[in-house]
Amino acid sequence: MSHYQIAVIVGSLRKDSFNRTLATALAKLAPSEFTFKQVGIGDLPLYNQDDDGNPSASVKRLKNEIAAAQGLLFVTPEYNRSIPGVLKNALDQASRPYGQSAWAGKPAGVIGISVGTIGTALAQQHLRNILAYLDVPTLGQPEAFLQVKEGFFDASGNIGPESKPFLQGWMDRYVSWVQQHAG
Ligand code: FNR
């Protein structure tokens, strides 16, 4: 395969989200055959199993965008030591009806940035648990638990010089993972 479309799922709806900034900055570290598209999850209704037979337009759109991608990138904050509800809702929405999950088999990376010192470690661990069940092959190493600090992003929103080598290494491993596992 010569081109890889990546669906990026950001776990924050906040306009000035650090995780959204991180997702945008990370995309610039990938080779040119990779295209990253942030998938909207803020317009999804709350998951209700009664709607499985008649999903809303936004749920259909989400599932189509996941289906069209060769890989997934989850960039999420930690809320109360887990993933934000909006992200869990998106995971649930695109996993149903039973047997028609959009996630299965799509190679993924998990990363996140937080103002707290544990750098989304617990949120990422919870997310990995969900992704294992959803049959999403997820990059194990390197793990990246990032904390917002002065200079992490430069004035243009790119990764600052101190963190760039580590995150370039992370992206290189992610790229190989997707190439290895994309169907
Ligand atoms: C947080 N925050 C937070 N941080 C953390 O490291 N561990 C946590 O468990 C929590 N819990 C939490 C709950 C809720 C409801 C909010 C709103 C925030 C702080 C969080 O890291 C910070 O708000 C980030 O800026 C959120 O990411 P975005 O929106 O900037 O991407």
Image (cartoon, rainbow, N blue to C red):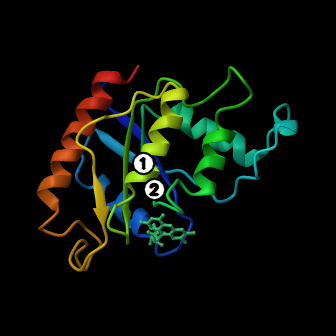
**Badges 2 and 1: C-beta atoms under 8 Å apart?**
yes
**Foreground residue among 120 and 170:** 120
Pointer 2 residue: 76
Q: Nearer the viewer, mark 2 or mark 1?
A: 1
Residue 32 lies, with reference to residue 159, above or below; the image says above
Residue at 12% x, 68% y: name it: 161
Pointer 1 residue: 124
- Tell which circle, 2 or 1, labels the residue nearer the N-terminal end: 2
Image coords of residue 135 (percent x, y): 50, 24
Quadrant of the snapshot with the C terminus: top left
Q: Amino acid at mark 2?
A: Thr
**Foreground residue among 67 and 51:** 51
Q: Amino acid at mark 1?
A: Gln
**Mark 2 vs ligand 1: CB under 8 Å?**
yes
Q: Residues within 10 Å of mark 1 (few under 14, many from 20)?
A: many
Residue at 41% x, 41% y: name it: 6
Image coords of residue 55 (percent x, y): 80, 39
Q: Residues within 10 Å of mark 2 (few under 14, many from 20)?
A: many
For numbered disc 2, what is the local secondary structure? loop
Is residue 31 shown to the viewer in this render? no
Residue at 30% x, 35% y: name it: 140
